[in-house]
Image: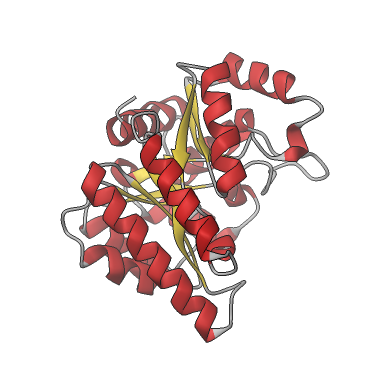
Amino acid sequence: MIDTHCHIDFKEYNKNRKEVMERAKNKLTAIINSGASLGGNRRTLKLQEDYNGFLYPTLGLHPSKASKADFTIIEQVINEIEDNIDLTVGIGETGLDYHEITDSMQRKKQEKIFRTFIEMAEEYELPLIIHARDAEKKVFKMVKDNSSLKDVVFHCYGGDIDTAKLIVEEGYFLSLSTIACFSDHHKELAKEIPLSNLLTETDSPYLSPFKGIRNEPAFVEEVIKIIAEQKSLTSSKVGKVTEKNTKKIYNI
């Protein structure tokens, strides 16, 4: 099993990060930690040093942060990603968040920065890790217009099934998070999306499958159980196929 999207660098883990990582190592083959800010990218690279061969970094800028960040910070993020391009296994997370950001100018700023990250993924032939919330169709059109992208992952997908099918038709991937443990819509997605296009994640520290307990990478097992249940497969089968998908996309 692999947790393809988490944020172990966040302060929520400062008191017991080592224990969280030990639990992950006992259960999982690998985890992919997603940089979401300038500081987050730097912390993610440090974690990659500490857990070399188990934790793999992707570097990006969360769209909600991108919409509000000063352009000097954005430029610094881009420069640092390019300086560490040999260490990252993907570009992102990046994308559009129309749920949190409603201002039209801030949305346009998101789109401009997202295009820059799309171009980076194309130039460096790396997978693009997308955060799309209430903007799945818009994001899909933007990436579809860039047919030279190596691989595209819609992380923590929660859009409609029709858009999910279009994403699959393009050969892109959708990652289902532990939200599937308590969301009927995500259970339906787990049933409808082909296993060959699925990845699994926790988006830790968010979206815990257990009430009152902070999420962590080891809990990715719970979303694998849900997918297995919805597809009438064994958890072992789902874990093996989604792990194989992940290794292929991220070249790990």
Q: Which residue is drawn at 48% across and 23% down?
A: 30
Which image quadrant for residue 117?
bottom left
Q: Which residue is drawn at 64% across and 35% down?
A: 9
- Percent across and percent down for residue 67 are 54, 69
**The one of 118 and 247 positioned closer to us in this rendering:** 118
- Percent across and percent down for residue 65 are 59, 61
Residue 119, compared with residue 52, is above or below; it is: below
- Percent across and percent down for residue 243 are 39, 29
Locate residue 32 relative to residue 129 in the image: left or right: right
- Percent across and percent down for residue 153 are 36, 49
Which image quadrant for residue 21?
top right
**The one of 41 and 168 positioned closer to us in this rendering:** 41
Residue 192, compared with residue 246, is above or below; it is: below
Q: Which residue lies furthest to the front in this view?
A: 72
Quadrant where the C terminus sits is top left
Residue 11 showing in the rendered view: yes
Locate residue 145 relative to residue 118 in the image: left or right: left
Residue 52, compared with residue 113, is above or below; it is: above
**The one of 236 and 81 positioned closer to us in this rendering:** 81
Q: Which residue lies furthest to the bottom in this view?
A: 104
